Image: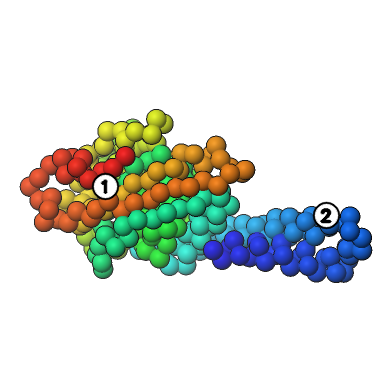
Amino acid sequence: MVFYLIALLSGVGLAVTGSLTFWPVTQWYDFYIPIVLFIAGLVAGFCIDWIFLDLSGRITVKKGVKYDKAYKFNRWCLNSGLACIRRLALITCKVKGKNKMPKNRRFLLVCNHRSNFDNFLITDKLLFNTDAPFVTKGSNFKIPLAKFHMHKCLYEKIDRDDLLQSLQVMKTCEERIANDVCSYCIFPEGKRSKNGKVDQFHEGVFGIATKAKCPIVVATTRGTEKVHKNFPFHISYVNFDIVKTIYPEEYEDKPLKVILSKNYVN
């Protein structure tokens, strides 16, 4: 929200001051002047945001260091940047079921995967002030600006083709949840669904919850797959629902796939 406001204020400020000083509006047909100034100020504002996120990430994150705790400043930078992108992408989100989230407990959040915007939505609308990073593919660690802060937010990179590496990541997530370091979010399908239907789960990811003995938050998104088609001329209306939180006493000695299949809504 802060980064978005900086850009808006920059645009409005330049449009007002510029129209009154160095590029004055003197005739009715000069209406285009404040519009041009607003756009220029908006772009300048986003450039300021970009520079701040880049420099703050480069300064605070040491290359090659494996961090063992989440840092609030980097979480704020990353999540604020994601929130800004969500607004720029013209995504309007309706959230249901926030009251079903576990209170004062670490958890594993699982959700269907329809678009690259899924994690933006989850982070901005549900987990903005919560240490709940994602387990994600390695290519996401190459995203400009975000890649620096992701390390200090304890995002974990997983290689789906490397079983041993995947198991090590799962173990790391399990230990951090059990030791109250952070929660984790994961897409159990392992990839985006291109047809909108829920693909088969990789059941191994649920071992994080069973070993850490933490609640499993079951969530669904609907509509994020339309964002790329709608932008920039149409608003995307997205639904995000917390379907249920499954506590350890509910899933002990029961097949997780059976439990989740009853509560996971496409």
Residue 186 visible? The answer is: no
| Quarter in which the N terminus is drawn | bottom right
In percent of width and height, residue 241 lies at 34, 51
| Residue wearing tag 2 | 32
Which residue is painted at 55% across and 47% down in the image?
Answer: 235
* Residue shown at the point (35%, 56%) measured from the top left: 96
Q: Using the rendered view, name the quadrant where residue 137 is placed.
A: top left
Of 34 and 119, the residue lying toward us:
34
Which mark is on residue 160? none
Q: CA distance from mark 1 to mark 2?
A: 56 Å
Q: Residue 65, position in %: x, y? A: 42, 56
Q: Residue at x 14, y 55 (%)?
A: 248
Residue topped by disc 1? 170
- How many residues crowd mark 2 within 10 Å: few (<14), some (14–19), many (20+)? few
Q: Nearer the viewer, residue 213 or 11?
A: 11
Is the residue under label 2 in contact with that under label 1 (CB below 8 Å)?
no
Label 2 sits on a secondary structure element that is helix
Q: Could you tell me how many numbered marks the image carries?
A: 2
